[in-house]
Image (tube, rainbow, N blue to C red):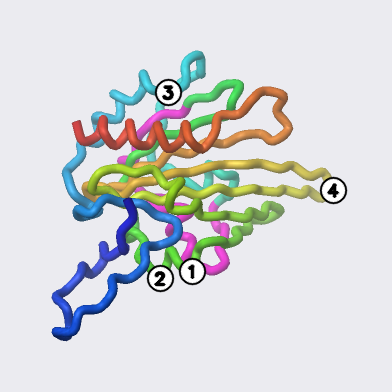
Amino acid sequence: MTTTLCLATGLGPAACAKPTSPPPPPPSSSSSPSAPDAGAINPANIKRIRSSLPAGYEVADVAGPVSAAGLWGFGSGWTAAPPQCAALADPAPADPGARGYSASGAGGTVYVVVAVPTQPAPDDAVVGECARWTMTFAHTTGDVTLAPASEAPSIDGVLTVAMSVTTRTVVESGTETDGQAVTAQAYVGGHVVYVTLVTDPGSPHPALDSRSVGDLLVATVAALRG
């Protein structure tokens, strides 16, 4: 269920009597026909999601501020190109009240966080301009891709986006380290909720996948609304 992203200004009445065709849906976001920010949430309910984390994984509390881009491996001072895509990569880098969990195991490390974003949810322009973008920090570079709309988790009344990133770090000795991450996030009740999975491409163990990330995001929003 995909809809135009009008969180910042809303949709006004038609400017003329002649009907026009509705604009096409954005390529990489999903929401229901109702208002994307519908419904209040209780961040304290994040504790309810603990039992939904992967079985057998080591679970730890996460407390803010939490940088989503930092979970990908980008330190303070990273840049994005185009620069407007930075808000997608790190929607709530400074909220001291951010909270959630991390769960690490053979299939990677999963982070579940709820926080207050520093900017409104992305609009059509940002989504269109950020289908693909790059990030840079010191010796680390990253290529980010927004998922197709069909792969963004569907949550009633909530705007969601999903993305994947591949990173490469090259140190002075020439040693290269590659990384992968998948993030799905939802904008609801004045908060952003995101689930990030970080995996090691060289691991001999099967990794968790983007579907598990999306399912966990859906479960987390339901818990926060509950």
Taking the magenta stretch, the answer to whether it contains residue 174 is: no
Q: Earlier in the sequence, mark 4 or mark 1?
A: 1
Q: Are marks 1 and 2 in contact (CB under 8 Å)?
A: yes
Q: Position of residue 220 (x, y in %)?
A: 32, 33
Label 2 packing within 10 angstroms: few (<14), some (14-19), many (20+): few
* Mark in the foreground, 2 or 4: 2
Residue at x 44%, y 49% (from the top left corner): 150
N-terminal-most mark, 3 or 4: 3
Q: State the residue lying farthest toward the top.
A: 56
Q: Secondary structure under badge 2?
A: helix
Secondary structure of the residue carrying tag 1 is helix
Q: Is residue 13 left or right of residue 155?
A: left
Q: Earlier in the sequence, mark 2 or mark 4?
A: 2
Q: Which residue is mark 3?
A: 53
Q: Position of residue 211 (x, y in %)?
A: 48, 35
Distance (Cα) linking label 1 and label 2:
6 Å
Q: Which mark is nearer the camera, 3 or 4?
A: 3
Frontmost residue, 99 versus 9: 9
Q: How many marks?
A: 4
In the image, the segment drawn in magenta is 76-102
Whether residue 100 is visible to the viewer of this picture, yes or no, is yes
| Residue beneath the point at 48% across and 39% down | 196
- Residue 169: percent from left, percent from top: 72, 48
The three-letter amino acid code for the residue at tag 1 is Glu
Q: Which mark is residue 129?
A: 1
Check residue 174 in the rendering and tell me which mark sits there, or answer none: 4
Q: Out of 140 and 32, give the one closest to the viewer.
A: 32
> Mark 3 or 1 closer to N-term?
3
Circle 2 residue: 125
Amino acid type assigned to the residue bearing label 4 in the image:
Gly
Q: CA distance from mark 2 to mark 4?
A: 39 Å
* Secondary element at image label 3: loop
